[in-house]
Image: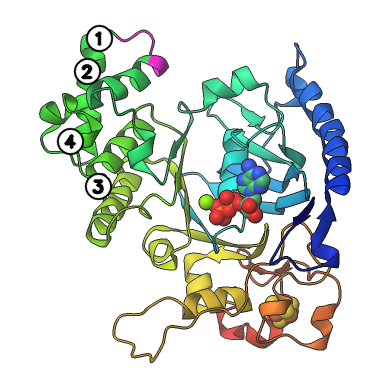
Amino acid sequence: MAIFIKNGAKDANYISAKESRRISKENRKITNGYEKKRNRKVIPKAEYVTKMKNPNNVVEFDNLHTYFFSDVGVVKSVNGVSFDIPKGKTVGVVGESGCGKSVTSLSLMQLVQRPQGQVVEGAIRFNTGNEVVDVTKMPTAKMQKLRGNKLSMIFQEPMTSLNPVFRIGLQVDEVIALHYPQMNKEDIKKRTIEMLELVGIANSEGVYKMYPHELSGGMRQRVMIAMGLACDPELIIADEPTTALDVTIQAQILDLLRDLKVRINSSIMLITHDLGVIAEMADYVVVMYAGRIVEKGTVAEIFSNPCHPYTIGLMNSKPAVGKKVGRLYSIPGKVPNPINMPDYCYFKDRCEMCLEVCAGIYPELVQLSPTHFVSCYRHYDIFREEDKG
Ligand SMILES: Nc1ncnc2c1ncn2[C@@H]1O[C@H](COP(=O)(O)OP(=O)(O)O)[C@@H](O)[C@H]1O
Ligand code: SF4
Ligand SMILES: [Mg+2]
């Protein structure tokens, strides 16, 4: 028996069953080591309590590496990612499917599929309001208290995230009761109704008694957002919150998120493959490609002066109102095999601006302004000087 990866190509992409067994044995040794460390009965506070580099941030991703130890090799899903989420701001994370956006956010929630998925290097500092912790080193029980309390997540699929056999009210009540154990039943219900109204559900008393199947996709997503907000989180992670909804409902949910952003003063990490969503919502943008950040900056910097050929490609593949095009641009080729990443620029094989120099080592992240960074040898050709600073 043999295992083929990537179109059955030979050599580099082919491994035998024997080789696969050897890899999985080796992987088990590595992941057991991580698990043993994580499952210690007592983890001293000094290991995970830390300090922010900048007290105005709510989250600091610092050189995060999250790998999956699979039977065909190590998938470096997040491979040295650093960016900040300032207090009260929205940071948009954008990139094609499979570039590591969800794994980055799951690392922050400590929800990466273990034992095969592990944070192998780096830190994620999170300001809970009371203290600063490195969530990658937090004990699991302590992390459970943070999740849904200080950190909450709105998932892509509102259909599957709600329990079909319980009424809406009961499901939101449960979240509130969990986080406010001192509240009595009446107050909990009052707060649930308030939350449903906050997310624009007009018939809140009626919806309270309904089952998920009685609601439309947009309404279910509103309920999910209400659950996410129920405990005044410091940070809301929205992973493709509108992808599963149809276009008119998408616009309504985006309006809602924008409106809430002003009212609740939480920070938002908004993950999407859709640059249009980022343009409307975000203050800062992080562009990911194959597990790394290729460019980051303020929304104005990224949209008016994109300096990485990948960002430019993403911009060009976005339909624009009033602009006539024969056929919408699509970036040629596909993301490289995540198991055998090259040493040179990961975008090289798809890049239309590639030069000889690009065959060298992976390009460093270069600073173009206090907030604008890019990782490309040709940034000097693309960057417009008048936008400097
Ligand atoms: N549980 C897993 N086991 C192995 N590989 C995974 C797992 N989850 C994600 N990956 C890999 O990690 C990479 C990044 O995935 P993901 O973060 O989900 O991408 P996206 O940017 O679309 O959210 C992909 O190559 C994916 O195949
Ligand atoms: S470093 Fe070279 S190959 Fe990579 S994105 Fe820049 S121009 Fe393209
Ligand atoms: Mg994803």
Image: 232 above or below 296: above
In three-dimensional space, the C-alpha distance between marks 4 and 2, rounded to whole angstroms, equals 20 Å
Q: Give, as a three-letter code, the residue at label 2.
A: Lys
Residue behind label 3 places its C-beta within 8 angstroms of ligand 3: no
**Which residue corresponds to mark 4?**
214
Q: CA distance from mark 3 to mark 4?
A: 12 Å
In terms of secondary structure, where does tag 4 sit? helix
Labels 4, 1: front one: 4
Residue 206: image quadrant is top left
Ligand 3 within 8 angstroms of badge 4 C-beta: no
Q: Secondary structure at mark 1?
A: helix
Please give the name of the residue rendered at 56% of the width and 79% of the height, measured from the top-left corner. Answer: 387
Q: Which residue is mark 3?
A: 218
Is 84 located above or below residue 307 in the figure?
A: above
Q: Residue at x 72, y 63 (%)?
A: 337
Please report whichever mark, 2 or 3, sits nearer to the chain's N-terminal start: 2
Of 130 and 45, the residue lying toward us: 45
Q: Tell me which segment is drawn in magenta.
A: 178-183
The picture places residue 11, in percent across and down from the top left corner, at 86, 66
Residue type at the position of mark 4: Glu
**Residue 189's mark?**
2
Q: Is mark 1 within 8 Å of ligand 3?
A: no
Residue 93 image offset from top left, x and y in percent: 53, 57
Element marked by disc 3: helix
